[in-house]
Image (tube, rainbow, N blue to C red):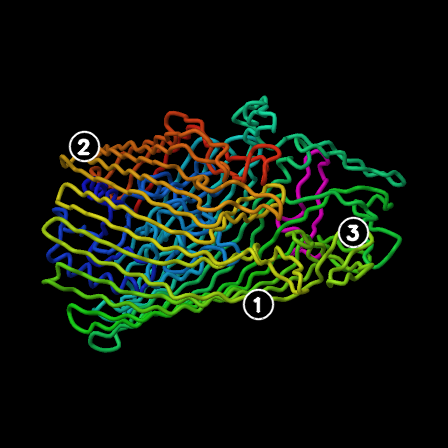
Amino acid sequence: MINRKRLFWATTAIVGVMAGAGAASAQSTGTEATEVQEVVVTGVRGVRTTDGTIVAETAGKTRSTVTQEFIATQAAGQTIVQTLNLTPGLNFTNNDPYGSSGGNIRLRGFDGNRVSLTFDGIPLNDTGNYASYTNQQLDPELIERASVNTGTTDVDSPTASATGGTINYVSRRPATDFGGWVQGSLGDFNFRRIMALVDTGEFGPWGTSAWFAVSSQEYDKFKGQGDLKKTQYNFRIYQPISSNGDFVALSAHYNENRNFAYYSPSLESTAANGVVTPAEVETSPFGWNVDYSANYVAPTFRNGVADVDSNTSSTVAAAYYGLRINPSDTGNIRLNSKFTLAEGLTFTFDPSFQYTQANGGGQQTTLTETNALLRGTRTTGGVDLNGDGDTLDTVRVMTPSNTNTYRYGINSSLIWNLSDDHQLRAAYTLDYGRHRQTGAYGAVDFGDPSNPRFEDWFGGLDDKDNRITNLDGFYLRARDRLSYATLNQFAAEYRGDFMNDALRINIGVRAPFFKRELNQYCYSQNSSSSVRCTTEVPNATLANGNVTFAATGATQYIAPYSRELKYDDVLPNVGATYRFGANMIYASYAEGLSAPRTDSLYSVTRLANGSIGNPDVQPENTKTFDLGYRFQTSSLIASAAVWHTDYQNRIVSSYDQDLGFNVDRNVGAVESYGFDGSLGWEPTDKLSIFASLALLESELKENVNISSSLIALTKGKEVVETPKETLGLRVAYDFNDVFSAAIQGKYVGERWVTDVNDQKVDAYTVVDLDARFDFAPLGLEGTYLQLNVINLFDERYYGSLGTSTSSVVGQPGYSRPFANISAPRTIMASLRYSF
C-alpha cells in the first residue's frame, strides 16, 4: 500500500523538499548533477523523515515539488499542471475534468506563455507563441516528480520566453526487477481509459533496464455534443555506465489528441448608456451548459441553381459542434546522459528532437465558387466546389491554422568541483525550431448533409486530394509562412559553501542569443494580422510599396517578404541560503527576457521610410527578488516567501475565438509583489495536513495606446485573470492498512477580465476527494482500487478567461470578453493490477 506518511511528505514537498538523496528537482541533467551532490551532503546533516527518504530543499529560490506518490492520488490521466495546483503562487484553470481540453496557467500573475514548461530538460513551450499545451503532457503515472520554480528560472533554463518561472517534470527511471501493471478507469461522461506499463528489469551484461507504456482514453464532453480521444506511447531505456552515477538514458514520447471543442460563452458587456447585456449563461436556455449547436441545416446541391449554405447564424453554422475540432500530434525523442571525465569533472549532454502537428480547430468559411481567390489570374470562370456541375454556389470549406514544427535541442553542462565546498559550472543550450504555418483549405464532408464533418482533421495539409485549388492550380490557404527560431544560450554558475556549510552562495548568469527568421509567403494587410494568400495580380502598386487588388478595393497589402530579428541579453541569476538548526533563510535575484512571439512579428505595418516593421513590439524584461524562510522538523514543514517583480514592456495576449489566434495587447510596465506560504503538519502517523496561501498585488504603470487617437486608461489597474488571493488545503488520513482517503480544496479570489478593470468574475472554491482500497495486505502488492471525485460540491464558476481591454461599448479597446465554463461534479474509479 501507499505509505501515507511518505505521501504526506510527497504532498508537502510543495513546500520545497525532494524525494530521495539521489533525486533533485531539476529541469536538466546538468542542473540535477549539481543539485544531487548538494542533496547528498545535505542528507547527512539535514532534516529527514524517520525513514530517511526525504531531505530539505536547499535551493536559494522559491521552489515546490511533488512526487509520484502524491501524483498517484489524483485522477488517472490528469494533466500534471492540475496536480500542481495546490502550489502557492500557481493558479491553473482546467478546461474539463479529465484534462484533455487544456487549460490556462497563471504563476504569480504571469500567463503560461511566460512560464517555461520542460519535460526531462526539453522545452515544451511552442517555438512560435510560447504557449503551453497542458493536454499534451506525459501520462502522470510515468512522472517521477514535478516542480515549480515560482518567479525565477534555473541558470540553464532553455528558454527565450520565461519571465515568470518554470514548471519541470521528470520521467520515472526503469525498475531493477521485471514487473508492471495494467490499469483501467471508468467515470462520468462515459470516461474510459486503459493504461499498461512493463518494466524489463535489469538485463544483459551491462545492467540495462527499460520500461514501455501505452495508454488510451476517450470520453464525452461534459456539455454539448462531441467527444475527446487521446492515445499515448512512451518508453525509456536506461544504461548505467559505472557505479559513480554515470548513465545514458534514451526516451521517446508520442501523444495524439482528437478533440471536439467546448464553446466559451460571452460574459456581460455594458453599453455607453450603462445598460448591461447579461452574460450568455444567463440568456441561453441551456444556462451553464450552453455549447455549440447540434443543428445544421442541410445544404442543397442542384445543377443550375445558385445554392447557398444558409447556415449563417452564429448559433448554427459558425458554432456547429461537428465543425469545431482541435487535433494535435506531438512527439519527442530525448537523450539524457552524464559522464565523469576526471576526478571532480563531470559532463552532461541532453540532445532532443520534437515534432508537432496541430491546429487551433474549427476554422471555416463560406466561399462563392467564382470568388477572386478561386479565379486567381483569371477574370472569369470558377471552381465547382460541391460537385453539382455548376459554379453558382456558396459552399462551406475548412480553413485550418495548421502548425508543423521540427525542433532540435541540446542541453549540456561541464561541472568542475574545485573542492568539497566550491563548484564551477558552464552550460550551453541550443533550441532550434522550424515552424511551418499553413492554412491549407480543405473540403467539408456532406455525406450526411445535416451532420457534416471536415474531410481531414488538418484540411489539405497532408491529403493533396482534399485541397481546394484555384484555376491556376494553386491550393488555397488561409496563411502560409515559415519561421525559424534559434536560441543559443551560454550560462555560468559558481556555488560555494562557507561558515562550516551554513552559508551557501550561488552566483550565476545566462546569456540568451535569440534569432527569428520570418518568411511570409502571403500578402499582409497593412497594419493588421490578416493576410491574403492568392495568385491574383495586384491592380496597383502605391508610392509606399503597398499593393491593392481589384477584389478588395482600397485595402492595402504588403507583398510577401522575409525578415530577421535578433534579441539578446545578459541575465544574472543569484541566490543564497543560510541554515541554522531547523531554520533556513534564503534570498534570490533573477532577471528574465521574453522575446516577441511569432504572431506579434507577423502583424506588420508599412513605416514612413518605406520599410516594414512593427515598432511597438519589444522584448519583455523582468527583475525578481525573493526573500524566504523555511522551518523543517520530522513532523512539520513550513515555508514563507515575500517577492517583488518589476516587469517592463509587458505584452498581454488573449485568444480570439473568431480569428483563431492570440491577439497581443501591450500594457507597458507592471509592478507586482506578494507573499507565498505553505505549511505541512503530520500530528500523527495516520493524519497529515497541508495548507498553502498566496497573496498578490499588481499595478499597471502606464496607459495603453489603442491607436494614434485612443488611449485605454490602464494606469493604476491590476493584471487580468490573476486572483489577489488563493488558498489550498489537503487533509489525508490512513484509516487502516487497507483504506485511506484525502480531501483537498482550493479557493481562488476574484479575477479581472479587462485591462481597465471594468469587469471581473467571482471567486470560487473547488473541493476534490480521493480514496483508495489497497490490496497489499491480501498479498497483491501494488494492486488497488481508487475513487476520485472532482469538484465534489458541484461548484459553478468561470475557468480560463478570454480577456480584453474593456467590456464597455465605445470605450477604447472594447470587445466582449468570454470564458470557459467549469466542469461539474465528476466521479471516476481506477483499478490497477500489478505483477
Badge 1: how crowded within 10 Å, few (<14), some, or many (20+)?
A: few
**SS class of the residue under badge 3?**
loop
Decide whether residue 710 is among the magenta residues: no
Mark 2 and mark 1 lie on one chain; the one further toward the N terminus is 1
User: Mark 2 and mark 1: span between their CA atoms?
Assistant: 64 Å
Identify the residue under disc 1. 564
Q: Residue at x 35, y 57 (%)?
A: 153
Disc with the residue nearer the chain's start (3 vs 1): 3
Instruction: Give the image location of residue 480, x and y in percent.
Output: 66, 58
Q: Of residues 697 and 566, which is closer to you in this image?
A: 697
Q: Residues within 10 Å of mark 2 (few under 14, many from 20)?
A: few
The relative height of residue 645 versus residue 242 in the rendered view (above or below) is above
Q: Which residue: 88% across, 55% down? A: 379
Residue flagged by tag 1: what amino acid is it?
A: Glu
Residue at mark 3: 554
Residue 141 in percent (x, y) is at 35, 47
- Range covered by the magenta-colored residues: 440-464
Left or right: 697 in relation to 271: left
Query: Can residue 417 be seen in this snapshot?
Result: yes
Q: Nearer the viewer, residue 242 or 284?
A: 284
At label 2, which amino acid type do we have? Answer: Asn
Residue extending farthest to the bottom is 342
The local crowd at label 3, few if under 14, some if 14 to 19, many if 20 or more residues have their Cα within 10 Å, is few
Q: Which residue is mark 2?
A: 736
* Of the image marks 3 and 2, the number of the one nearer the N terminus: 3
* Along the viewing direction, whichever of 396 and 699 lies nearer the viewer: 699
Please tell me whether the stretch drawn in magenta is mainly helix, strand or loop: loop
Q: Closer to us: mark 3 or mark 1?
A: 3
Of the residues tagged 2 and 1, which is closer to the observer?
A: 1
